[in-house]
Amino acid sequence: MTTDDEKPPGRRSEPISLSGRTVAGRYRVVGVVGQGGIGKVYEAEQIGLDRTVAVKVIRPERRDDQITIRRFLREARAAGRISSPHVVTLFDCGTDDDNGELYIAMELLSGQSLSRRLADGEVMELGEVLRTAAMIARGLRAAHEAGVLHRDLKPANVFLCDDGNVKVLDFGIAKLLDESAEETLTQVNRILGTPVYMSPEAATRQPLGPTTDLYALGLLIYEMVVGAPPFKTGDAWKTLEAHVKTEPPRLSAAAPWRPIPRGLDELVARLLEKKPQDRPRDAGEVAGKLDRMAMELALAESRPDDLTEVEVHLPPARPAPRPERPAPPIEAEPPEMPEMPSDDVAADDGLEATTVWQGNETGPHPARPPEEVVGRPFPKEELEAYRRAKELETRPARPSLAGLTQRQLAVAAVVLGGITFVTMLLLRLLL
């Protein structure tokens, strides 16, 4: 895997060290994408399918390390469970017949990580923040419904694709909810995760659940809006202590130079609650709220008599099934910080590095229906449909529906989310 500092933009960014090699008899290596603490990622052509993929292998000096091997296999198992346009797609995992080397084949992405986007110094527009956060939340929802907790959500593990999509990466320390016991993924007395983006319960080694990832999502939204995370002291131990004991400033107070919607201010405050049970419990619900905020913002920035095309995130047409597996129990109160020296905490840049792939593929994988790809331009006609549907919800008097199709009103109602079933029936009658 590779960090942003290690990998410059573009394809084949390093000298080719395995030119012409074929992995597992079907992945012909054509270049090196980058490398990190435990792995190296190559660009490869999949023989017979005319497809360019990213092939990850363990670095030679780490191939005999059992913890590294377990993390590598954990990443494959976790990512392989999840099917979502907002989670990196795993194609294959196995052992090379020639040398017994483990490999993972994944989709090759074109774009940049969120960490690089934030490092550019350019302030993210609020609409971009809302759309990005909504897609991250949908990726988390898919992971949670597959029984996977990410546990290391951070800007380096979020990829902004050139086609407008957003994907969650790197499940190397993910927790599988159906495991009876926690597998050893680190040395004794070390905490898994990145301190700057770690939840209070993770910092104190308490039971984790979906709200653990949602706490990290709140931190990402905070950083995208403010430009810096709420807790970053330069010392891993002090940062963890701040997550447990210090209340973060509200968004509106941390970024007084920009208008913050009240709904976003309140949502982030809830996501960053110290007690897991006080946070939102469903990532899909969070995504829906972010979607509606993005639409409201687009409406506020558009004049009703002169609407222009804006980008919004369209949610899936059908909601994913609710998980049957209950979330792990959570403690009512986070306990005191454990006694341990600061050098036993994995530092922000010392954790296993992050996979960031770049290539020239800018569209969805051929097997994925185009309508699943989000972040595309939202037509002004459907934005107008949303506005009128909103009017009908708040003011039952019959609005002007000239020029609107039933599809446009239906799309608007889906995006709005809050429109009642009765209102939908009224819309049909009015048509």
Image: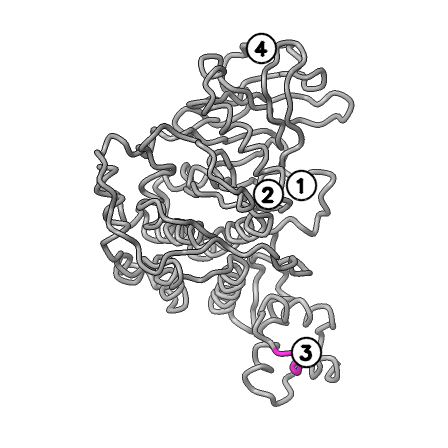
Question: Residue at the front extreme?
Answer: 180
- Amino acid found under the numbered disc labelled 3: Met
Q: Do labels 3 and 4 touch, CB within 8 Å?
A: no
Residue at (57% x, 34% y) in the render: 110
Quadrant where the C terminus sits is bottom right
- Amino acid found under the numbered disc labelled 1: Pro
Among the two numbered marks 2 and 3 on one chain, the one whose residue lies closer to the N terminus: 2
Identify residue for label 3.
424
- Identify the magenta region: 420-424
Q: Mark 1 falls on what kind of element?
A: loop
Answer yes or no: is residue 375 visible: no
Q: Do labels 2 and 3 touch, CB within 8 Å?
A: no
Identify residue for label 1.
364
Among the two numbered marks 4 and 2 on one chain, the one whose residue lies closer to the N terminus: 4
Residue at (57% x, 56% y) in the render: 313
- Amino acid found under the numbered disc labelled 2: Asp
Dot label at residue 18:
4
Q: Would you say residue 423 sits in the magenta stretch?
A: yes
Distance from disc 2 to disc 1, alpha carbons, whole Å, reads 8 Å
* Image x and y of residue 215, in percent: 39, 53
Identify residue for label 2.
163
Which mark's residue is nearer the viewer, 1 or 4? 4
Q: Quadrant of residue 54?
A: top right
Q: Mark 2 falls on what kind of element?
A: loop
Q: Judge whether 349 appears above or below 203 on screen.
A: above
- Amino acid found under the numbered disc labelled 4: Leu
